[in-house]
Amino acid sequence: MTKMKRAFGAGIVALSLSMLTAGTAMADNVVVAGYAGIFQENYVKAVVEPFMKANPDITVEFYPMPNSAQTLGTLRAQASAPQIDAAILDVSVAKAATGEGLFAPMDESVSKHIADLYPQARIAGVNAVGVTFDNLVLLYNTGKIKQAPDSWEALWDKTYAKQVSIPAVPDIQGTTLTIIANKMAGGTNYTETVEPGLKKLEALAPNVQTWDPRPDVYQPISSGTASIGIGWNARAQVYADLSGGKLGVVLPKEGSGFQINVIGLVKGGPASESAKKFVDYALSPEAQAAFTQAMFYAPTNSKAAPLISKEAIERTAAGSMDQMIDINWLEVAKIRDAITEQWRRRIIPLSR
Amino acid sequence: MNAAAETAPRTWRSGELAIVLLLPIALINAIGFILPVLNLARYSFNQSTAGGGIADVFTWENWTGLLRDPFYLELIFNSVWISLAITLTTLVVSYPIALYLHRSTGSWKTFLTVLVISPLLTSAVVRTYGWIALLTDNGPVLSFLRYVGLPAPSLMFNIKGVFIGLTEILMPYMILALMAGFGRLDPRVEEAARTLGATPSRTFWKIILPLTLPGIALGCLLCFVLAVSSFITPKLMGGGRVFLLATEIYDQAIVTLNWPLASTLSILVLIVFGAALWAYSVVLRRLD
């Protein structure tokens, strides 16, 4: 009995000791929500781990999310008692989150680096700033297509009939292609009309094998199920390396459009001061350069480029900023439903 | 007097017991199912804003928009008739198997039953990918058709692929439901029909089929509900060309972030299920 009592007493002491230490460490546990998979893998290695090394009193937990919509859903569900401190998500979704009051204000009081960001990364009306730039690219199977295509027109080439893989709208890869096609067909301002682009896409429809490539756009092309298609640059570059050269990636001569991931501070997040510190680090030239080096997202900090190797920067759009169509995703959000409707009524039925 | 005094509190107690026993599941159902569905219904009267926001204002817009938009009317119509057609095909291919299983005996029957159930041990995702590998343009099925000189239409990334995949995936459910409903089929009745001079086909249409109708009704209800709500197979095999209620709910909820419209469509699916259940009960009442 005394033995048991003693053991019990020792347990109490141990428990209170651990609570004491936990008490000091708990305030500095920052939870960052972001994309799962290779994004998480590379982001933890390139940004989270160096941050924790520099700030031993703060631990950062990367909370993986399958997509931005799920992130928004989680933030909504936790609105009254947030568990997430900061979130990385698509800019148009961040706009919705801002509108619903889920994000705390983001300005130079959070991070001085915000002043160094490219103008595309600072979006009026959104309580979050650009943390990565990505762009639409042409993907092709190097076994089936020997000569690397240099133009989006390759998608329209009848040689690849039923071999083209396009993620259709409402996926924003389809939206970006609409805007690019609009420019190729002579359209001047996509916010006024995308009619020329839609007409051009009607001609593409019969070539399309699938409008919903699974599990993602990269796998069917590297395996040869499809010959050519579209996808995002960063992931394509990583998968191109992983595929042993079977997946080819081209930034076509007509240029492309950016997809912007932003980082925002969750309003009322449990570790707000440490979270600000992390956001500040995530926007710093060093962190931006390290992530570009790891995963080929173009940096949003204009001072990051000199820190990045020439090979890595050539595989991003950072070297061809002037060729990029300036897509205002907040404007696009307003016409997205109309574009989706046109795709479903006019374009997709032509491929049946 | 004494006996009455004894039974009266007992019946009262058993009623109490029923309430106590039902309470946990009723609570779980209320929290896990009824409340979320009510919440879903509430969302369907909210307004969606550009970019995926939800405005907390009451509106009929989602419902009236659904009925005014030919795309959604076609979507609802397509979902229902494709599911009905898949249910019918599943029934036609499963019925002989179920009948054979019902008639077989001993370890042979056990072996065959395990064989029928075994596809359920593999996830629908894996089986769907299996079908994709078999049915692609360079896959074995089309290569064989071309080799023997038959026309080889594209079977993947269109409605045909969804049809083939879902039929196979639903077959085990149909076979099990049919077997469960075959209890009334007494082999002696069939034998009697044959001794009285009925041809095999007459025996089938006049004796076997009417006696197995309860099993058919159950299997059809189950498969129809599963077909309407199936999401993975149409998503993977439809190639973005096949628009069904389940895939559209996914697109609206996850891609476009239009939760009010997704909620409206979800409630609509519940209404379709309600109609199917009603039809089932009407059929059952007629059979009895």
Image (cartoon, coloured by chain):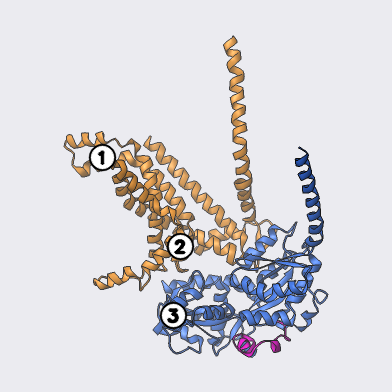
Chain colours: A blue, B orange
Residue B227 appears at what percent x and percent y?
Answer: 44, 55
Along the viewing direction, whichever of A25 and A314 lies nearer the viewer: A25
Residue at disc 1, secondary structure: helix
**Image: B16 above or below A283:** above
Q: Quadrant of residue A273?
A: bottom right
Give percent across and percent down for residue B238.
Answer: 44, 66
Q: Which residues are magenta?
A: A300-319
Up-down: is A57 above or below A108?
Answer: above
Assess disc 1: are there few (<14), some (14-19) or many (≥20) residues with their C-alpha within 10 Å of its C-alpha. some
Q: Which mark is residue A227?
A: 3
| Dots 1, 2 in contact, CB < 8 A | no
Q: Residue B194 sits in which quadrant?
A: top left
Q: Judge whether A16 appears above or below B284 on screen.
A: below
Side (left or right) of B44 relative to B202? right
Chain letter for the residue marked with disc 2 in the picture? B
Q: Amino acid at mark 1?
A: Lys
Residue identified by numbered label 1? B206
The reply, left or right, for residue A39 in relation to residue A100 is left
Both labels 2 and 3 in a single chain: no
Count of numbered labels shown in the rendering: 3
Give the residue drawn at x 41%, y 56%: B169
Spatial distance from mark 1 to mark 3, Cα to Cα? 56 Å
Q: CA distance from mark 1 to mark 2?
A: 38 Å
The disc, 1 or 2, on the residue closer to the chain's N-terminal end is: 1
Q: Which residue is mark 2?
A: B234
Residue at point 33%, 47% (across, down): B111
The residue under the point 50% across, 46% down is B274
Q: Is residue A210 left or right of residue B184?
A: right
Which secondary structure, mark 3? loop
